[in-house]
Amino acid sequence: MLILGMAGSAVFAQQANLTNSTTPIPIEKPVDGYYKKDNIKEARVTPYANLREADVMFQKRVWREIDLREKMNGLYASPKARLIDVIMDAVMAGELTAYDAVSTKDDPGGDEFSTILKPEQVMSKFADSVLVPQFNENGEQTGSSMTAGEFNPDSVLKFQIKEDWIFDRQRSVFEPRIIGIAPMIKIKASGQELGEQPAFWIYFPEARQVFVTKEVANRSNDATGLSFDDLFMKRLFSSYIVKESNPEDLRIKDYAQGIDKLYESERIKKQMLDYEHDLWSY
């Protein structure tokens, strides 16, 4: 038997009171608010426009890095909704496939989605290994083993994205299309940091199915109506270019140092913008 009770404008279901208790016994978890937020949870991916190879007049591949310490990128690092938590939860649940970022003969850059990683291998990419002693029934140490330490999501400060800039002459549109996204980890040797590299790669078209149902946290408005897919599709992030496709497969840091790396990044960015600008006559 169910009894419907009302508190203000909220309606709740209550089981029959067999113990004379004054506390309602809800059948389902109460709604945290006065309405259900279903728009994001039930959202579907808006597909890209169809693209034919014959219509691709120009294409340039670039690699960018998103630094979460920049103010504009704070949406990706909120403790209430971290991008790395969304990715890791989906990988551990089998909803996303992680690909090894280690370079091989067939995949020199390590970003062609060649080798699939198991969830436990993905977790070990972030946590430092620790030596754990092993004991017998008498409490005597019999040996030790290396075990991955605890993962700290706050340790991920950067993401790298790989994208293609394509001019579609059929639609007269010059647009970016993200191919992959990778969290960055710091490389250490002998107690010294040797730089950063991708921990693993996620195929972005697959990740969109997960991102579109994950709402972002906004400082100004709790009813953002934005998902992580919206952030990427609307280009709501600050980034800098670290590599462009070239015959030598060089990164910017391979031929530029210091402030010159930033100048080179801006030069590549301006070169692509100039290409689009020069397509039109005014």
Image (tube, rainbow, N blue to C red):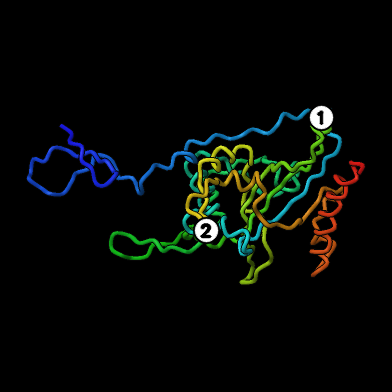
Q: Kindly identify the amino acid type of the residue bearing the numbered disc 1.
A: Gln
Residue 51 placement: quadrant: top right
Question: Looking at the rendered structure, which numbered label has been put on residue 85?
Answer: none
Where residue 127 sits: x, y (%)?
52, 59
Q: CA distance from mark 2 to mark 1?
A: 40 Å
Q: Secondary structure at mark 2?
A: loop
Q: Could you classify mark 2 by the number of other residues whose Cα lies within 10 Å: few (under 14), some (14-19), or many (20 or more)?
A: few
Q: Residue at x 84, y 27 (%)?
A: 54
Q: Residue at x 16, y 49 (%)?
A: 23
Residue extending farthest to the front is: 8
User: Is residue 146 visible in the rendered structure shown here?
Assistant: no
Q: Are marks 2 and 1 in contact (CB under 8 Å)?
A: no
Identify the image quadrant of the N terminus. Answer: top left
Q: Could you classify mark 1 by the number of other residues whose Cα lies within 10 Å: few (under 14), some (14-19), or many (20 or more)?
A: few
Q: Secondary structure at mark 1?
A: loop
The residue wearing badge 2 is: 220
Where residue 273 sits: x, y (%)?
83, 50
Q: Kindly identify the amino acid type of the residue bearing the numbered disc 2.
A: Ser
Q: Does 177 sit above or below residue 265?
A: above
Q: Nearer the viewer, residue 96 or 15?
A: 15
Q: How many marks?
A: 2
Q: Mark 2, mark 1: which one is toward the viewer?
A: 2
Residue 16 placement: quadrant: top left
Where residue 282 sits: x, y (%)?
91, 44
Where residue 96 sits: x, y (%)?
55, 40
Q: Nearer the viewer, residue 73 or 202?
A: 73
User: Is residue 38 visible in the rendered structure shown here?
Assistant: yes
Q: Nearer the viewer, residue 164 or 137?
A: 164
Q: Decide if residue 165 is on the left or right side of residue 190.
A: right
Q: Nearer the viewer, residue 35 or 229?
A: 35
Question: Looking at the rendered structure, which numbered label has been put on residue 170?
Answer: 1
Q: Does 155 sit above or below residue 54?
A: below
